[in-house]
Amino acid sequence: MALPEFSEVDDALSSGGSMVRAAECHGVLCGILCASGSADMQGWVRHLFESRDEKLDISANALKVLHDVHQGTLAEINDEEFQFSLLLPHDDCAIEERIAAVSEWCSGLSLGLVMGGLQDKMLSNDEVQEFIQDVQYIAEACFRTDSDSEEHTEQSLAEIEEYLRVGVILLNDELQPSSAPSPTIH
């Protein structure tokens, strides 16, 4: 099951008054799934709409979109062929928007790991520990782009996104071991 489009998820969240954006929403879910092996759909949705505008109702369509994110992420994160993807804006969006979304996704992953009950003693792999530290750094980092190095910025962002994608697979394999071989982060 493929994930819904980033803009569709963002619209579903904002239509119900959520202050959470699509990238953070997906990061939280990924963190919960990695740390606990499952994610209660209702608890996750409650978190997403905790600080919402009470005047706005959460539509059935918005809940369906979030259900699709939940189910798609669950399928992808456990995919034996490592087909996991991050829910981020398309490459044709402004680079600043995409950079902000990566930061939000990392912030969400960190929060989701805590919500899922991650404890340091659960981590025995040094690469995974380093990955979690890197995620926290990326979430807090302040990015800027130079107009004369747009190609370099694009390449760097693509490398960060791939690092995060493979890192989540490795993290999930560390915390929720399966029989599939795990990838190596370089």
Image (spheres, rainbow, N blue to C red):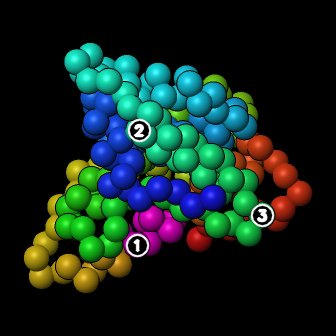
Please name whichever residue, 54 or 89, is drawn nearer the observer in this view of the structure. 54
**What is the quadrant of residue 117 in the picture?**
top right
The picture places residue 67, in percent across and down from the top left corner, at 55, 40
Considering the numbered disc 2 on the image, is that residue within a helix, a strand or a loop? helix
The picture places residue 129, in percent across and down from the top left corner, at 61, 46
In the rendered structure, which disc, 1 or 2, sits on the residue that comes first in sequence? 2
Residue that numbered label 1 is attached to: 158
**What is the quadrant of residue 175 in the picture?**
top right
Q: Count residues near mark 2 (Cα–Cα under 10 Å), then give few for <14, some for 14-19, many for 20+.
A: many
Amino acid carrying label 3: it is: Glu
Q: Residue furthest left?
A: 147
Residue extent of the magenta highlight = 157-163
In the rendered structure, which disc, 3 or 2, sits on the residue that comes first in sequence? 2
- Residue shown at the point (47%, 51%) measured from the top left: 134
Image mark for residue 80: 3
Query: Does 36 sit left or right of 15 as displayed?
Result: right
Q: Are marks 3 and 1 in contact (CB under 8 Å)?
A: no
Disc number lying in front (1 or 2): 2
Is residue 116 inside the magenta stretch? Answer: no
Image mark for residue 62: 2
The picture places residue 156, in percent across and down from the top left corner, at 35, 73
The picture places residue 149, in percent across and down from the top left corner, at 18, 80
Amino acid carrying label 2: it is: Ala
- Residue shown at the point (56%, 24%) measured from the top left: 42
Q: CA distance from mark 1 to mark 2?
A: 29 Å
- Residue shown at the point (26%, 16%) measured from the top left: 54
Disc number lying in front (3 or 1): 3
Considering the numbered disc 1 on the image, is that residue within a helix, a strand or a loop? helix
Please name whichever residue, 163 or 17, is drawn nearer the observer in this view of the structure. 17
